[in-house]
Image: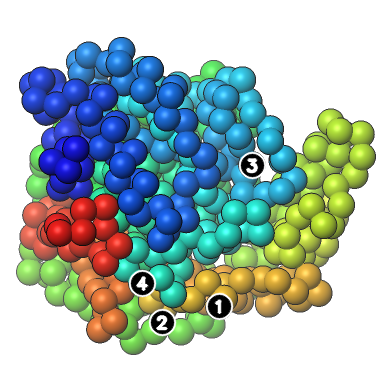
Amino acid sequence: MEDFRTLVATHDGIALAELVRGKEVTPAELLAATLASVDAVNPALNAVAERLDEPARAAAASIIGRESVLAGVPTLIKDLFMPVRGARMANGSHLFGEYRPDFDGELVARLRRAGIPIFGTSLSPEFGTSYCTSSARFGITRNPWHPEVTAGGSSGAAAALVAARALPFAHGNDGGGSLRVPASCCGVFGLKPTRGRTPIGPMAGEGWAGMGINHAITRSVRDSAALLDLTAGADIGAPYAAPHQADTFLSATRREPGRLRIGVIECAPPWPTDPACAAALAHTVSLLTSLGHHVEPLASPVDSHAFYDQVFTIIGAQTRALLDGIARQRGEPVRDDEIEARTRIIVRDKGGVSGAQYAAAVDWIHALGRTFGRLMERYDVLLTPTLATPPLPPAALAIDDATLPLDAVIDRSHRFSPFTAWFNATGQPAMSVPFYWDERGLPIGSHFAGAFGAEALLFSLAAQLERAAPWAARVPPVCAVPAL
């Protein structure tokens, strides 16, 4: 068993699947090793929402290894509006009780068809609205690099387990940075795809007016590309569809990106960029220049206060709609004690906006997409820090006082992560890549965005950077194989 756990800790998903196809290891052995690794680290991390060991064992027993390039490699699904048949879907909240859907989300179904056993769900903050994976129901997910700082959110549990080498990849979703923020905090790779690239149904047509999307946290670039190949494509009735991709995303990781024009945005006023994050950005610029890319500074094109006001108009209206829908289904209104302070503030200040105000917010966001679209005619890629500060203590991001104004909530969250939500609004693909660790040993990611539909270019660039400055050898103090 120890040897199999070392395999899981040192190989990415594609490499593990190759061992399965070569009959050097079975899916059942990989699953057993992964379960043991999760058992080893989860007491320190608090990252697992629910285990589904027996269904996963049954799935592993039927996998032959030819279903896909990741067949036989087990994973987790984030517990946030992505149904897994028979699993509790709490969405990080007391509100949903023990609700257990009797169907899979389309993305989950595609992973199953690809021969990927699903052995449980990972934690999320309530409704995914925090950059810290913490909830009143499930507690705080800890960062494997340091227990006193956040693992990020809202896919922080997925990132913590991948960083701790318990598994090579895990599902997450991203409505304002929820894949990229935890990827930065935990020193792993996180890519948010183009709007409409992956399915969100059948429970919903869109999340947050198209800002939300599903994908994964991975240790290697090629695993992220392979997962996107397996899950890409609009599902039935989807309101959006990303541009057609002629070749596989995995093949893009094997191509050089060519000499790219890269615009660098260091700061998102009024929030400052911490010197450690500025140093990480400078380190990345130096690496890009050494690889022959043209890099030049660029001022932020975003009015932060106006932007987040419009974003929270959308979030507030859709959260109100969610709560109203639950009230109708159960025949009684949602009580304040069933939802957290952050949710109550959002609904109080933005849940009563008119239809006209909601439509105006969506129009404002779409106009920003046009602005960035024109900017991408000048640049192949935009580069920012993923975060404006290194990982913070969970208390620095917590909202426990429901009397706070929404502006205070926005300031607390987005002075930490001012950049990532831009690209949820524009629909562009964006990724956090780990190149830099600060003097405390905390990872700090660099954030790249491509033009709408340009995931292949981002994967090509990320793979080039991974070869030039590999990060996989860095192992956090909380690790599934302590002797690694």
Mark 4 and mark 1 lie on one chain; the one further toward the N terminus is: 4
Mark 3 and mark 2 lie on one chain; the one further toward the N terminus is: 3
The answer to whether 429 appears left or right of 229 in the picture is right
Q: Residues within 10 Å of mark 4 (few under 14, many from 20)?
A: some
**Quarter where residue 130 is shown:** bottom right
Q: Residues within 10 Å of mark 3 (few under 14, many from 20)?
A: many
Q: Residue furthest front?
A: 1
Q: Which mark is residue 132?
A: none
Of residue 283 and residue 291, the one placed in the foreground of this image is 283
Separation of residues labelled 2 and 1 (CA atoms): 16 Å
Separation of residues labelled 4 and 1 (CA atoms): 15 Å
Mark 4 and mark 3 lie on one chain; the one further toward the N terminus is: 3
Q: Is residue 455 above or below residue 402?
A: above
Separation of residues labelled 3 and 1 (CA atoms): 25 Å
In this rendering, the label closer to the viewer, 4 or 1: 4
Instruction: Name the spot of residue 279 as percent of width and height, x first.
Output: 26, 82
Q: Is residue 92 above or below residue 343?
A: above
Where is mark 2, residue-wise?
273
Q: Amino acid at mark 1?
A: Ala
The answer to whether 58 appears left or right of 66 in the picture is right
Separation of residues labelled 2 and 4 (CA atoms): 22 Å
Locate the C terminus by quadrant.
Answer: bottom left
Where is mark 1, residue-wise?
396
Q: Amino acid at mark 3?
A: Ala
Instruction: Name the spot of residue 444 as percent of width and height, x first.
Output: 31, 71
Q: CB of mark 3 within 8 Å of CB of mark 2?
A: no
Q: Amino acid at mark 2?
A: Thr
Q: Which mark is residue 90?
A: 3
Instruction: Name the spot of residue 446 as percent of width and height, x first.
Output: 30, 66
